[in-house]
Amino acid sequence: MEQTFEILISELVADEEFRDSFLRNPRMALHLAGDWGLPLCESEIHALMTLERSRWDRVAEEVDARLQMAA
C-alpha cells in the first residue's frame, strides 16, 4: 500500500488537473484514484487531506523549476 501512496503523491505533484480536482474536492479525487487502481487506506486519505492545501502547488512549482534547471 505504501507504493500506492507514493504514486498518488507523485500524481498530485505532476498532474495539475488531478491536483486541482483534489484541491476542490479531496475525498472525491481520492475516491476516483481508487477506481484507477490506487486505493488508499483511511489513514493515508486523512494524511493527504490534512496537509495545508497551498503546499501542493508550492511543491509542484519547486519540482518544475528543478526539472527546468536540469534540462
Image (cartoon, rainbow, N blue to C red):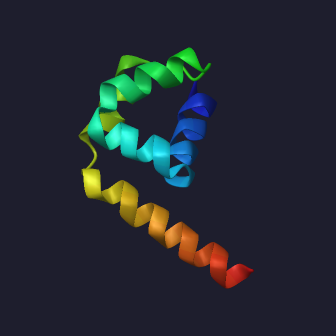
Q: Quadrant of residue 63?
A: bottom right
- In the image, is residue 45 above or below residue 42? below
Q: Could you tell me residue 52's position as x and y percent?
A: 24, 51
Residue furthest front as drawn: 17
> Do we see residue 40 in this rendering?
no
Q: Residue at x 38, y 55 (%)?
A: 56
Q: Residue at x 48, y 71 (%)?
A: 62
> Do we see residue 19 in this rendering?
yes
Residue furthest right as drawn: 71
Residue furthest bottom as drawn: 69
- With 46 as the anchor, is 2 left or right in this view? right
- In the image, is residue 39 above or below residue 3? above
- With 25 as the anchor, is 60 left or right in this view? right
Q: Could you tell me residue 39's position as x and y percent?
A: 52, 19
Q: Quadrant of residue 44?
A: top left
- In the image, is residue 38 above or below residue 53? above
Q: Nearer the viewer, residue 33 or 51?
A: 33
Q: Could you tell me residue 68's position as x and y percent?
A: 64, 79
- With 54 as the anchor, is 59 left or right in this view? right
Q: Quadrant of the C terminus?
A: bottom right
Q: How many marks?
A: 0
Q: Residue at x 63, y 32 (%)?
A: 3
Q: Quadrant of the N terminus?
A: top right
